[in-house]
Image: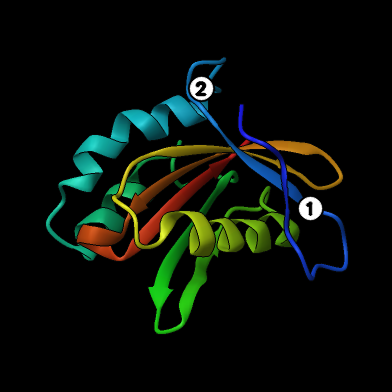
Amino acid sequence: MHQLRLVENQPHQVLWRETDFADDIPATAMAALAAYYPLARCPDRSVVEQWIAAEPSLFGPQFAMFQTVEDGVELVMHGKDVCSKIVETLIHIIERDVLGTEDGARRYEIETEERRDATLLPLFQNAGLCLAVVI
């Protein structure tokens, strides 16, 4: 297991670490993983957005979608169960751990007031997006 890392310059303590997919995977995260291969091969952003919007397990209360911008990553939209602290942490993780690497599903553990499991599906190469499912 990877070491917990602190998100610095935050008014509240937030820790995160990359984990693997060997342990119990929540059903929503499994649905996201199952969709990842075909999503990663979609030809453009609009097709990816339509696919995600049509899939309740990907476009529900536990999702967040990010896009690349000139100087980093920004939130496009998120479900009601994803709080601002989690969004800030996901942006931090994407900018420091995901951007500039090969696209590939990743799993993280995030600790704010509670421990959350986040599955990231980077789709930067074909769509300029990153989908997160937060349990």
Dot 2 or dot 1: first in sequence order is 1
Disc 2 packing (10 Å; few <14; some 14–19; many ≥20):
few
Mark in front: 2 vs 1: 1
Give percent across and percent down for residue 55. Answer: 36, 40
Helix, strand or loop under label 1: loop
Residue sticking out furthest to the left: 43
Q: Which residue is mark 2?
A: 27
* Image vertical order of residue 29 relative to residue 93, above or below: above
Is 119 placed left or right of 2 in the picture? Answer: left
Helix, strand or loop under label 2: helix
Instruction: Give the residue displayed 41% in from the left and 68% down from the top.
Output: 67
Disc 1 packing (10 Å; few <14; some 14–19; many ≥20):
many
| Residue nearest the observer in this picture, 3 or 102 | 3
How far is mark 2 from mark 1, CA to CA? Answer: 25 Å
| Residue nearest the observer in this picture, 64 or 6 | 6
| Residue nearest the observer in this picture, 39 or 59 | 39
Q: Which residue is mark 1?
A: 14
Q: Amino acid at mark 2?
A: Ala
